[in-house]
Amino acid sequence: MSPHFDAGKLAEDIKTLVKDAEALLRASAENAEDLTDEARERAERSLHALRRQLNDIEHDLKGRAELLDGYVRDNPWTAVAVAGGVALLVGLLMGRR
């Protein structure tokens, strides 16, 4: 069985990672005196920028998925032919090994 790529799950996992990093940053700032306010602010700005970029990527991926879905719904036989062609090429390449 081949693994299934789920962009939505990936985006949620990255969001969870960002939230965990923010919590860790807050906890370390409360417990460590050597972490200056300036370094903490830089890290928070970086995390906010990462979150904005992640939201942009998620929005872009959803838009592309909707476009692809629309194309496949409008041209089902073309999509089947393309998928079959790709499967044939992959089969030929795998057969050479």
Image (cartoon, rainbow, N blue to C red):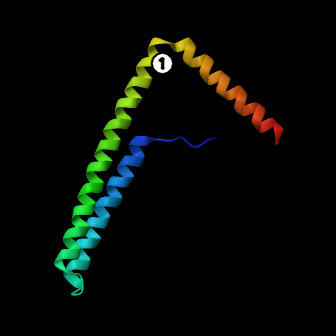
Q: Residue furthest right?
A: 96
Count of marks, rendered view: 1
- Closer to us: 27 or 51: 51
**Label 1: which secondary element:** helix
Decide: is 62 above or below 82: below
Q: Amino acid at mark 1?
A: Val
Q: Residue furthest bottom?
A: 33
Residue matched to label 1: 72
Q: Return the x and y of residue 74 as percentages of the image width and height.
A: 45, 12
Q: Could you tell me which residue is drawn at 39 percent across and 42 percent down? A: 8
Quadrant of the image for the C terminus? top right
Decide: is 46 above or below 10: below
Q: Return the x and y of residue 42 as percentages of the image width and height.
A: 23, 68
Q: Could you tell me which residue is drawn at 29 percent across and 71 percent down? A: 24
Q: Return the x and y of residue 80 as percentages of the image width and height.
A: 59, 18
Decide: is 92 above or below 23: above
